[in-house]
């Protein structure tokens, strides 16, 4: 079965703009988590959604938001982009929020100029 | 609080030699432990996990890891390295039965296998 799909793979945006990233989990998976990966900070948890509800949120400013749809697909939005938002954004899905392992997508590489 | 330490930023090994990538952890209660691998501009790929049971866990591509509760370690090993094993490796931990999103990743170790 298909893995976790993230679109787009690459994005270039200008400071001040906003961006929306998409994640389609593995079929049947209902939990979706988002992570930001940067060389300096490593992998940092952004938020988790399960059955359209945000279950957990990491320590990121309110410019970062997300949502989950009834088909479990998730989007994350970053408003008023800053240079420091340049990162690889990874989405992971699991069957439930307590499932033992999560499966990651290829990521979306966001570059803010 | 949970934490994971990967003490080596880089590990260099000759092809055919055994490799070890180190990981120590701290978690309240029993741990779930994971190893992921990341190739350039790609997502994280699951290698193996320890949930319970046998301390020696076998995973994908010939990798294995040993859970050592007394030393709170979960080192990744492979008996004979391949050039294609060159990648970034992440150790991760979360408390048993906690939410998948509570997983904490180490800083990563870059494994370089020379021909």
Image (cartoon, rainbow, N blue to C red):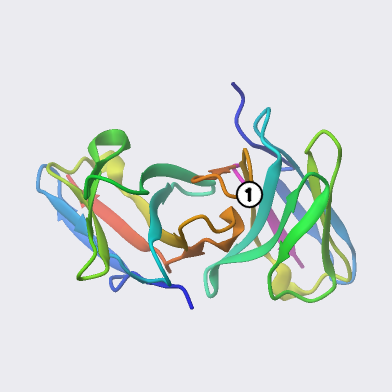
Does any portion of residue B90 appear in the rendered image?
Answer: no
Q: Position of residue B48 (x, y in %)?
A: 35, 43
| Image quadrant in which you'd find residue A99 | top right
Query: Is residue B46 rendered to the left or right of residue A33?
Result: left
Provide the chain ID for the residue under circle 1: A
Q: Which residue is mark 1?
A: A97
- State which quarter of the image contains the C terminus of chain B: top left
Q: Nearer the viewer, residue A93 or A87?
A: A93
Above/below status of B111 relative to A42: above
Q: Residues within 10 Å of mark 1 (few under 14, many from 20)?
A: many
Q: Which residues are magenta?
A: A105-113
Residue A104 showing in the rendered view: yes
Give coordinates of residue B29: x percent, y percent: 40, 68
The x, y position of residue B17, in whole percent, is: 9, 47
Residue at 83% x, 47% y is: A52
- Residue B3 location in percent, x, y? 43, 74
Q: Residue at x 67, y 53 (%)?
A: A33
In the picture, measured across the screen, residue B110 lies left or right of residue B73, that is right
Specify whether residue A107 is painted magenta.
yes
- Residue A25 on the magenta segment: no
Q: Name the quadrant containing residue B89.
A: bottom left
In what element is the residue under mark 1?
Answer: loop
Horizontal relation, residue A23 to residue B27: left or right:
right
Q: Residue at x 43, y 69 (%)?
A: B107
């Amino acid at each position: 079965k298909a893995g976790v799909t993230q679109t787009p793979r690459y994005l270039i945006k200008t400071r001040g703009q906003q961006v929306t990233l998409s994640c389609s989990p593995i079929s049947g998976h209902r939990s979706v988590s988002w992570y930001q990966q940067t060389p300096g900070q490593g992998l940092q948890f952004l938020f988790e959604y399960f059955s359209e509800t945000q279950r957990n949120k990491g320590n990121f400013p309110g410019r970062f938001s997300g949502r989950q749809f009834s088909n479990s697909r998730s989007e994350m939005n970053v408003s008023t982009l800053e240079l420091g938002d340049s990162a690889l954004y990874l989405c992971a899905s699991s069957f439930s929020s307590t499932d033992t392992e999560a499966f990651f997508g290829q990521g979306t590489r966001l570059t803010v100029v | 609080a949970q934490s994971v330490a990967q003490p080596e930023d880089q590990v260099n090994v000759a092809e055919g030699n055994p490799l070890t990538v180190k990981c120590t952890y701290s978690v309240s209660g029993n741990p779930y432990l994971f190893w992921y691998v990341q190739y350039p501009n790609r997502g994280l790929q699951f290698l193996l996990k320890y949930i319970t049971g046998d301390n020696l866990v076998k995973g994908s591509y010939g990798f294995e890891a040993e859970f050592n509760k007394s030393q709170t370690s979960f080192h990744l090993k492979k008996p004979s390295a391949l050039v294609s094993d060159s990648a970034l490796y992440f150790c991760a931990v979360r408390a048993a039965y906690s939410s998948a999103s509570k997983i904490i990743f180490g800083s990563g170790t870059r494994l370089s296998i020379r021909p």
